[in-house]
Amino acid sequence: MRLHRNLCFAVIDGLTQIFNDDQYADKVIQQLLKRDKRWGARDRAFVAETTYDIVRWKRLYAAIAEVKTPFDRDNLWRMFAVWATLKGIALPNWNYFEHTPTRKIKGRFDELSKIRKFRESIPDWLDNLGQAELGDAIWTQEMAALNEQADVILRVNTLKTTKEKLQSELFDIDIETEFLKGYSQALKLKERTNVFATETFKKGWFEVQDASSQLVAELLNVQPGMRVVDACAGAGGKTLHMAALMENKGQIIALDLYVNKLNELKRRAKRNGVHNVETRVIDSTKVIKKLYDKADRVLIDAPCSGLGVLRRNPDAKWKLRPEFLDTIRNTQQDLFQQYSRMVKIGGQMVYATCSVLPSENKDQVETFLASEQGKGFKLIQEKNILAHQTGFDGFYMALLERKSK
């Protein structure tokens, strides 16, 4: 591979914004890719994947390059040189790469790779926490899996097409996919490509949604004609899945604190041909209280650490703080206590997170069931999904049924 100066500059600019200006990697890369209209698909892929790679391995590369935060541009070029050297890419004769100690880089890599917190490039506190909660062996395997690049998984919109028909349409435009055993509406791309530019996406035939995430709506047992509340709907990936499972019949009330997320859900619903969703902004406690004892099904897709989706958001491990985890655990239990009141007697609810930590998952369910409000519920089923076992995102989901007041 030959390095091109303008593409490398884009990577360095992106890393400056992510590391020093605390911007989100996905948003920064989105902007970078619009920088030069002459860039082809391969150029854009280089910028995106190289930036994500260096973000993912920040601690390891910084240690090898012997640089510390805040990184100036010379520091970032040194980290870039580490990335290129470890990828086997010849460094061009540019000023930035003068005196790059290639042999030393490989030696330092071998040395640091024996230590998990460097090998998997994670902060000390997070390494200690993962080991304490999951045990040494499982945490070691899980972190390795969470550092792999995520596959692109589609969820077929059964309101508009079938899995077989979508696969055929994509094949006709040279996008090959495969079925995934155990995931009824999933198609996995054999090679990464920009599926959002396809006519099939614009027609609402599919959404991009990880295979683990697709299991959440299915666990909730929604049926056509039910009244369902998606209590933390966000931009609505799971809302749209539930609408398809309900065949557009019944009512889904999508709640969220943020109106912009619900507006995005409305746009997506229109493209998907979904018309049984009503959005409501949680601007007071009245919004929740009005729904007490009214829902056949409730989904609590709770805010969490996001550790299960590090493959997609590698910068999250640098933004995450121990104190945030303490706060979010309190929020999770509070949502459990409040939103469970919306479930009718005989109704069901799913509590889900994209975290792999028991303290956000199983422990929260046990705390809820032991509480006064939780005594009216029983646990029906739970799924603890680890990335190293499935190859997909880390997730947790528990199905509970309300027995009494």
Image (cartoon, rainbow, N blue to C red):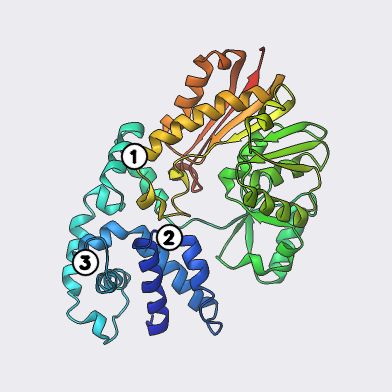
Query: For numbered disc 2, what is the local secondary structure?
Result: loop
Which residue carries the number 1 mark? 322
Picture coordinates of residue 179, whole percent (x, y):
64, 52
Which residue carries the number 2 mark? 23
Instruction: Find the distance from the CA under tag 2 to the CA under tag 1.
Output: 19 Å
Residue at 56% of width from left, 44% of height from top?
212
Amino acid type at mark 2 = Gln
Quadrant showing the N terminus? bottom left
Q: Cβ–Cβ below 8 Å for labels 2 and 1?
A: no
Query: For numbered disc 3, what is the local secondary structure?
Result: helix
Q: Nearer the viewer, mark 1 or mark 3?
A: 1
**Residue neighbourhood size for the residue with mark 1, other residues' Cα within 10 Å, grouped as few (<14), some (14–19), many (≥20):** few
Q: Is residue 273 visible?
A: yes
**Residue neighbourhood size for the residue with mark 3, other residues' Cα within 10 Å, grouped as few (<14), some (14–19), many (≥20):** many
Picture coordinates of residue 144, whole percent (x, y):
36, 49
Amino acid type at mark 1 = Pro
Query: Is 101 left or right of 142, judged from the image as shown?
Result: left
Q: How many marks?
A: 3
Picture coordinates of residue 349, whole percent (x, y):
64, 27
Q: Nearer the viewer, mark 3 or mark 2?
A: 2
**Above or below 177: residue 127:** above
Residue at 25% of width from left, 53% of height from top?
118
Q: Disc number at residue 65?
A: 3
